[in-house]
């Protein structure tokens, strides 16, 4: 089974993926798995507290497997201080309801690590859409965090990074890209010089550890 831990594609009654919701938090189906959170791009200072309350109410059910994506983004318009406040609030919430956190981070890894420290977070953390260098990867791994990879694997510069990330720390995802999860697994297995079967067994194991489900 090929698990896709982060997709924006609309509900397909598919229990092999985690569908991300960044708004309309109430609109879930019991036939899907979800993550929900306030994305830094979509923070609107005038209603973010309302959105946060809605997300909190909607995130209790068992099929909401994670909080996020939430995080920090240096190249979006949202004031950075406000991003940090809303990120921290969501990390604290995830800890309150004991769910893992899926993180969006663009050019703000140092600051993201600082927010995690401030939060006394003890929940598993997955940095999604990872396409950065090995130094950043190592720093995140040293904090015990997981890394999820998607279309970035098709950039040849990622080979040397992905090939040395421990397999028990990786996830794979389609995000909003026009790739099939099969193609992402195929590419990942090729870079890691392993079989798709082996890789998918490992990621199923990682999913059990982080998301507390067998995806079935
Ligand atoms: Zn996403």
Image (cartoon, helix red, strand yellow):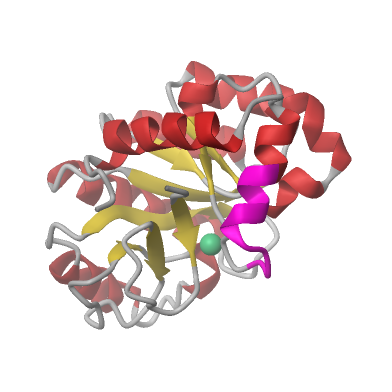
Q: Is residue 125 above or below residue 139?
A: below
**Rendered image quadrant of residue 14:** bottom left
The residue sitting at 39% across, 66% down in the picture is 19
The residue sitting at 28% across, 42% down in the picture is 211
Residue 180 drawn in magenta:
yes
Residue 5 drawn in magenta:
no
Q: Which residues are magenta?
A: 177-186
Q: Is residue 24 above or below residue 49?
A: below
Q: Is residue 12 visible?
A: yes
Judged left or right of residue 177, residue 148 is left
Q: Nearer the viewer, residue 38 or 74?
A: 38
The residue sitting at 13% across, 48% down in the picture is 97
Judged left or right of residue 185, residue 115 is left
Q: Is residue 89 visible?
A: no
Image spot of residue 82 (x, y percent): 46, 61
The residue sitting at 67% across, 54% down in the picture is 183
Q: Is residue 158 above or below residue 180?
A: above
Image spot of residue 182 (x, y percent): 60, 54
Q: How many marks?
A: 0
Image spot of residue 70 (x, y percent): 43, 56
Look at the magenta stretch and give its main secondary structure.
helix
């Amino acid at each position: 089974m090929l698990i896709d831990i982060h997709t924006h594609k609309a509900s397909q009654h598919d229990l092999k993926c985690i569908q991300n919701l960044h708004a309309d938090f109430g609109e879930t189906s019991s036939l899907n798995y979800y993550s929900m959170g306030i994305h830094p791009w979509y923070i609107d200072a005038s209603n973010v507290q309302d959105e946060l309350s809605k997300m909190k109410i909607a995130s209790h059910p068992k099929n909401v497997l994670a909080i996020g994506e939430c995080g920090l983004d240096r190249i979006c318009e949202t004031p950075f201080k406000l991003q940090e406040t809303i990120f921290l609030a969501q990390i604290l919430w995830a800890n309150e309801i004991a769910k893992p956190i899926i993180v969006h981070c663009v050019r703000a890894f140092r600051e993201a690590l600082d927010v995690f420290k401030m939060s006394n977070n003890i929940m598993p953390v997955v940095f999604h859409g990872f396409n950065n260098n090995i130094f950043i990867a190592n720093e995140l791994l040293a904090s015990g965090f997981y890394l999820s990879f998607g279309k970035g694997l098709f950039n040849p510069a990622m080979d040397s990074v992905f090939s040395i990330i421990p397999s028990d720390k990786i996830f794979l995802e389609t995000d909003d890209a026009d790739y099939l999860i099969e193609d992402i697994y195929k590419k990942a297995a090729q870079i890691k010089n392993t079989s798709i079967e082996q890789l998918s067994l490992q990621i199923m194991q990682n999913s059990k550890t982080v998301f507390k489900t067998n995806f079935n």
